[in-house]
Amino acid sequence: MAEIDIQLLALNRITFLRSGDKLVLLAVQDSSREIFNLSLADLEYILGRKLKSVLWRPDEYLEAAERDKKYLTANGIGCTFYSESSYPAQLREIFDPPLLLYYRGMPLELERVFVAVVGTRRPTGRARSAAYRLGFDLAAEGITSVSGLAKGIDSELHRGSVAGGGRTIGVLGNGIDSVYPSTSNPIARQMLLKGGTIISEYPPGMPPRRYNFPARNRIISGLSRAVVVVQAPERSGALITADYALEQGRDLYIHSAGLVGPSGRGSRQLFEAGATCIDGTGDMFRDWGWNSGRSAFGSIGDKAGVSHNLKEKAGTRLARLMEMELSGEVERNNGDFVLKRGR
């Protein structure tokens, strides 16, 4: 493990600066050490805006960073910075990339294809099974899966990947020292035992604050070649991840298992906007122009297409739901498609 830069750890602890601010400061200063010799007025001048916080206490940040370094070293936690070769290139290209990533487990294998799978914490049984199967099938192709270690779809994706003997990455919305929610600790341990990785941009001790999770979602999509939304209600964090995927030029898919009922309203919104619907990994691979069983060690740069063409697909947005209605799988109820009773 490379020597950890105390000044960079300290810089990452400054909560009133955005990731982009921190990268600007590093770009204009000769060294990270010089940042902590600046006054608050200096910071505002360099960044070109008034900062909300007046709690600029460089010594406290540096002391906290010393404690962080000891904790990381004692617990075998790695750290990769924006400028290092071990930092994922695809993440470096997004808007507002994290200054650093803390990680537990194996370092990220940057040559692998990553696919994110996200969705509601309260999925239907069918959507839950679909997430597990996606994880299992991605593992079979040597593809690393990515999700957020939340209840529901996230955890099922991780479980399926572990069962399939593959690698899976959990991205936290809190400090690297703990897993939230605590109910995800068992699957997190299995992931690490099977060669997976848990990552966070947040330092040890950072609680799971509500606003951390939308920010976390940009990393989930940013790491990945594609994002699959298995099932999302109308107001769902998975829709934030979908928005990031579009912004970042990632492929965006929705799963047919999550389209029906109130839990699928957000998924249907994506569908009606032209997102590609899949039944499983085979559909996604065909969309990429992959043959079954081909090696999955590509890169984001070689993908066949991205989701900027969603509007062009909007003309066929309801085809899948109509097929399911005609086959008797679903019926309409107050404007929603719902599974028929007994199915």
Image (cartoon, rainbow, N blue to C red):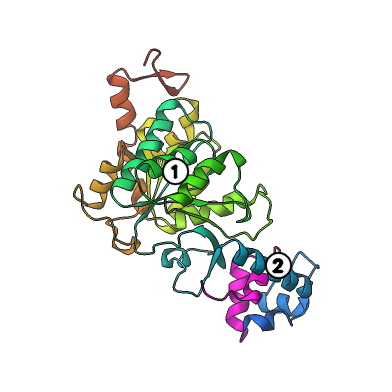
Rendered residue at 80%/67% (across/down)? 55
Q: Who is closer to the viewer here, 231 or 243?
A: 231
Is residue 149 left or right of 47 when viewed as pictured?
left
Q: Position of residue 223 (x, y in %)?
A: 44, 58
- Magenta region, residue range: 1-30
Residue 158 is tagged as 1
Rendered residue at 66%/68% (across/down)? 70
Is residue 24 left or right of 280 when viewed as pictured?
right
Q: Earlier in the sequence, mark 1 or mark 2?
A: 2
Q: Position of residue 131 (x, y in %)?
A: 40, 37
* 269, above or below 86, in the image: above
Residue 67 is tagged as 2
Q: Quadrant of residue 255?
A: top left
Magenta highlight on residue 23: yes
Within 10 Å of the Cα at label 1, are there few (<14), some (14-19), or many (20+) other Cα atoms? many
Q: Position of residue 98 (x, y in %)?
A: 55, 64
Check the picture and name the quadrant holding the C terminus: top left
- The answer to whether one can see residue 257 in this image is yes
Q: Residue furthest left?
A: 291
Label 1 vs label 2: CA separation?
31 Å
Residue 263 is tagged as none
Q: Secondary structure at mark 1?
A: helix
